[in-house]
Image: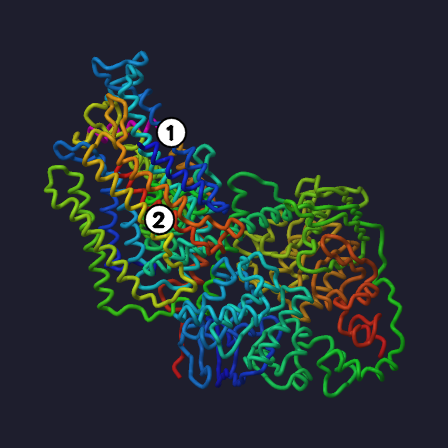
Amino acid sequence: MLAVVGAVVSVVVVARRGDAPWALSYRFYVYFALFVVVLRVVYRIVLGGGAVEGETVLIHLPEIPLPEVARGIQLLGDVTAVSLLGALYDGMRLAAIILCVGAANSLANPRRLLAAVPPAFYEVGTAVVVSLSVFPQLAESVQRVRRARRLRGDAGRGVRSLRRVVVPVLEDALERSMTLAAGMDARGYGRTGGATAAQRLVTGGLMLGGLGALCVGAYAYLDGTAPRVLAGPVLVVGVLLAAAALRSAGRRVRRTRYRPDRWRPAEVLTALCGVVVAVGVDRAFDLDPYVVVPDLGSWPTVSLPVLLVVLVGVLPAVLTPPPATDVAGPSSHDPSDRDPSDHDEGEVPRARAA
Amino acid sequence: MLELRDVTFSYEDAGPTLKDVDLLLPDGELHLVCGRTGSGKSTLLGLFNGLVPHFTGGLLDGDVLVDGSSIVGTPPRELAHLVGYVPQDPAAGFVSDVVEDELAYGMEQLGLDPQTMRRRVEETLDLLGIADLRRRSPRTLSGGQQQRVAIGAVLTMHPRMLVLDEPTSALDPTAAEDVLATVARLVADVGLGVVVAEHRMERVVPFADRLVVVEHGHVRAGEPADVLRDSPVAPPLVELGRLAGWDPLPLTVRDARRRSAPLRERIGPAPVRGPRRPVGAPVLRADGVCVDYRRHRAVDSVDLTVRSGEVVALMGRNGSGKSSLLWALQGGVRRAAGRVAVGPDALDPAGLAPVAARAQVGLVPQTASDLLYLESVDDECAAADAHTDGADGRCRALLDRLAPGIDGDQHPRDLSEGQRLSLVLAIVLTAAPRLLLLDEPTRGLDYSAKTQLADILHAQAAEGRGVVVSTHDVEFVALVADAVVVMAEGEVVSAGDVGKVLAESPAFAPQTAKVLGPGWLTVADVAGASS
Amino acid sequence: MTSRLTPRSALVLGVASLAGLVMFLWPLFVQPAAGATRVDQPFIFMALLPIVVLVVVAELTEGGMDAKALAMLGVLTAVNAALRPLGAGTAGIETVFFVLVLAGRVFGPGFGYVLGCTSLFASALLTSGVGPWLPFQMMCAAWIGLGAGLLPRRVTGRAEVAMLVVYAVVAAYAFGMLMNLSSWPFQLGIAVPGSDQTLQLVPGDPVGENLHRFLLYNLLTSTWGWDTGRAITNALLVGLLGPAVLTTLRRAARRARYGEPAVEVADR
């Protein structure tokens, strides 16, 4: 079941990724996911644990006694099929999340994501954009300064000589930031009326309310003995209040967007697919938990309806237009490098439900 | 229309930078602001859009008006739609990584609707001839293209005035010509008012309608020919006109050439140029030097010989491999092929330890401040002495010779452009290298500072050093060089005596040569012949 | 954004930090409902933590951000993002906190908080390291920047550098521990009836028991390797480069003049 999720995500990625650098990073996520699964199983073997009488023992390992400080730790010991399977499933669950996030990361253009940030984060978004564009200059500056060190007859190595690189590079960067600030200000950055006192009060109230609700909700959620009304619903209220606060905070920014990204049918379709999968799997869990979290004793089963629901996730790979790989790059205004990300945002909760 | 009424401005703890300035700059004309380094040109420019005093601090008295309404106290952002300001280094001001978005940025801040933005972006791309760059990243463009993108980025806001701070100082002659032609077209076709501050007046004077001279805090404005009569800074053409007593002064080469017949008769044939000073044995022999950057060959089989007592100028477009060649000669950049031999022992600096290499070859890089990392001028000098055997106090002594009167407690980054260059030069010269290399040293220097630098380099050559200067500045080459090497695409395309090479190339001919014919390089040549 | 926090921002920060702490420390407090078959707190929190981080960032920049602060933030973020891969992978050398601590000290707690967030975010974008761990890292880094800004102002000179070195060491270990805490339930699993393992989180156990198990896990997996490496590198960098970098940053801060208008207009 989890393997199917992983496969679905991979198919979408392979079918619809561009050739930009971030698109090629999916391989890294796959490796990392595999690593997590292996690590999980290795931990289980090394830290051993509670073989229950009567289970199939796969390997007999001697148990290493430990001093009292380390009470609770059991090194090695018998490895049973059940405990191994449990570790494997847990590892795969995390791996599936990593794959989903990795897919979103490799299909979405990070800069376009930044261009789509809500107005409340306009300033911080701009700061990140600035830092991304300053980044290559910084590398160049480091190279220049390192070369210049030779001119002063300085062959020193070690942390002390780092100063000769760090100070000029930092001075250079800060000087540049002042030039940039002057340039941005001269081009109208930040010419907004600002919010009225009443608006600010509303924003602040919403923020505090939202955060407070999140706090209470999170605590109630953890404490199984607290009334359930305080858990789920309060968390939802907290999220809604926070969203309202962000909306309210964003109203002060009066600014338009050049060539905004629009939702086209392909994007809506992909997002819908993601939602269908997430909701479907969550329902399936309520109906038959063992499809999603396999029983440790028996062979994992997959029911047909659940399989079909998950396979809906493949649809975007076929139904959306392929990315125009020749123009892939920051300038690409091609819809397909956005839509799979929406799709995967839908898929993350799906894995979460799994 | 910009207007200053009785403006006095001073930075904290300093006397007034501008005193009782009254100035009126109408629309539809090109105004050239000029003056010595540090005379307050940038301050004057900053006043027009509020950067001064909002970004610099300081005390402003008087009134600044844009289109008749006072803007004192208004921050730059609220003036963005009235005054378009392009800073000195356009690359440092780019916000996005696509040209099109860069052009739209200002309009987004103004809150214009998408249709208008789309239309203005297209119009501006066409107006500036950068439509084919629309999807490029502004940082990967050449200097001239960057300048045009930066101008476009403020033009889309449809400002009434355009303010440009040294738009051509980093550009080679051809790129500078392109940018200025674009600006002139904006004045002529769009009726925009443009204010340009520029040290290399010879480039802008032919396009200027009015000249604004800043001197000791006072400002004078008027017809270029009138103001130039006694302006503290003047291009070689005007110096020549003053020498010959022409009235009104010539502003274009063609103008001067038409009137030059009597002068030519008086001074006779061009002098036969001998060496400025005795030259000795070669200090540098480079054969077949190649430098590769990734898959691209930056320097391709360059041969270069520099003799002691000789000043060689290295010229060529931006990106033609000048800097790479200098670094390869110093050993800081790896050579892909070729040999470099310095001094009588034919040492290769690339194979020496930094301290030993420094005694053979000294290099002042393009961004000279890369060398500075301490908190005061005295600390920097002491560190330079420490890296050289038995050189106590030598660096400070050199600095006092190059630029007297620098306070030792000052932070090196607070020095003026010229002072900082002097400090770095002093640090480099502390090791008494046989060969001195300078990469674009004239940025931000006015005419007299350039003359001073030329004198310093002549003195170094007279001490038996070989000197190589890479520069775009034709007039500076005419002033300083004995021989010229022109590079293009990493190769040497012409080399030889300064008179011969400069005369051969229309792009590199100094103004005096353009007027009086090859052989006459500087106004000083003419002055020598006519006296 | 100013170098001082307004009471309101401080309140939002406080509540948000509390919420953030709950989301880090939940394994120690969790009380499962009777008969629960799955534990999905971690997945819910993975989704909620970004919201908490974002709300605080929105609050801190709520009054609009001055172009100078913004440019400074952008450039320092780039510096941090550039420092990060320098150490990645090589024996736990982790350089990212060095500038963060110093910048937080010079520019104040609010700036430090936002810088922590943006630094980790930008470096994740640049190295394609976006993952479920990112919000946790952002929150931790933000706390480090915030804490550096809240250190006593009166301490100057050598004492200041010493204080920052100690802070950097503490921050390095705390960061490692919190990040471990956030990944612990994933790495070792959560005990549910039927799969029993030592060292793992047992929901419902007393805080002390789980804490003990966690500390052992922490000690075994990373304290001696990465955390110590990180602590040493950061302490060395702050100690040796701190004075010079502080001077540089303070010069810049003077020029940028945070918070107060840099304008004086004479009466006309």
Residue A329 colored in magenta in the image: no
Q: Is residue B277 left or right of residue A129?
A: right
Tell me the distance, in whole angstroms, between the alpha carbons under discs 1 and 2.
46 Å
- The chain identifier of the residue carrying mark 2 reads A
Where is A49 relative to B279, above or below? above
Of residues A297 and C122, the one nearer the viewer is: A297
The mark found on residue A148 in the picture is: none
Residue depicted at 33% across the width and 71% down the height? A193
Residue B83, horizontal then vertical, whole percent: 48, 76
Q: Is residue B339 left or right of residue A149?
A: right
Of residues C14 and B391, the one nearer the viewer is: C14
Residue B395, horizontal then vertical, whole percent: 65, 54
Where is A4 relative to B23, above or below? above
Residue C70, horizontal then vertical, whole percent: 41, 60
**Residue beneath label 1, please?**
C224
Give the amino acid type for the residue marked by disc 2 in the picture.
Thr
Give the amino acid type for the residue marked by disc 1 in the picture.
Trp
Judge whether residue C239 can be spotted in this image.
Answer: no
Quarter assignment of residue C171: top left
